[in-house]
Image: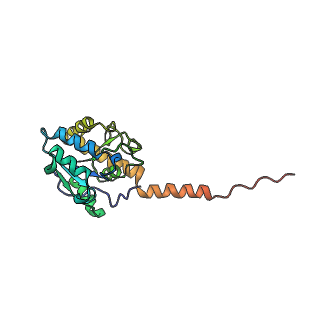
Amino acid sequence: GIDTDMFRPLRVAKQPNEIIYVSNSEDRNKGAPYLLQALRYLRDSTDYRLTFVDRPREQLRLAPRLLRRYGLSTRVRFTGRLTTPQLVRHYCRAQMSACPSLYEGFGLPAAEAMACGLPVVATTGGALPEVVEDGVTGILVPPADAHALAEAMDTFMRDAQLRRRMGQAGRQRILEKFNWRKAALQTEAVYQQVCEPSPAPASEP
């Protein structure tokens, strides 16, 4: 679950057309190459910035190489590792979160972003559709489809009302379904069920 007291909307200035990506970009299953390719399609039409939350830039190989190849180095800011309060502030400064994974077991960055009131562009890979409700809290696209990612991000950039509506719906979805208190109660209920002694078999007459 998500700690919705920690991951929550803050009153900080939003940065125009800022996208946030939080993941291990060296793991190709996390889809960073498709996100960077999508940004290349947006390059000429939109003044955007990407905040890249990962290890420090000097420890990364794949993303910096692709940024140089695509001519996007000035569009991306690498934060290095962040504390949780720093991460929350970065979520809240952004206009949207991008989760381009080919597969996710849960999709923690998507859930964190939603808890902070951000709309999410994500793929249908793995469990992401269980977290991000397509057309309600974000836009889902097929995995490994850079053009679809670009179109979804462009849609959000052009529609502030849509961003606001989906961001609010995302926060509500996390509060209702994925907050850590609810997860703890559900886990406790499962343990109680498992640990309850079975009824003794009826004795034969």
**Is residue 193 shown left or right of residue 108?**
right
Could you tell me residue 140's position as x and y percent?
32, 38
Number of labels in the image equals 0
Report whether residue 106 is seen.
yes
Q: Relative to 197, is 49 above or below?
A: above
Q: Residue at x 35, y 46 (%)?
A: 29
Closest to the observer: 126 or 197?
A: 126
Could you tell me residue 12's position as x and y percent?
19, 57
Q: Residue at x 28, y 50 (%)?
A: 117
**Is residue 39 shown left or right of residue 27?**
left
Closest to the observer: 189 or 132?
A: 132
Q: Image quadrant for the N terminus?
A: bottom left
Q: Residue at x 71, y 55 (%)?
A: 199
Could you tell me residue 96's position as x and y percent?
24, 47
Closest to the observer: 47 or 169?
A: 47
- Residue extending farthest to the right is 205
Specify the quadrant of the image occupied by residue 128. Answer: top left
Q: How is the image coloured?
A: rainbow
Report whether residue 79 is seen.
no
Specify the quadrant of the image occupied by residue 149. Answer: top left
**Is residue 149 shown left or right of residue 199?**
left
Q: Relative to 110, is 184 above or below?
A: below
Could you tell me residue 59's position as x and y percent?
26, 59
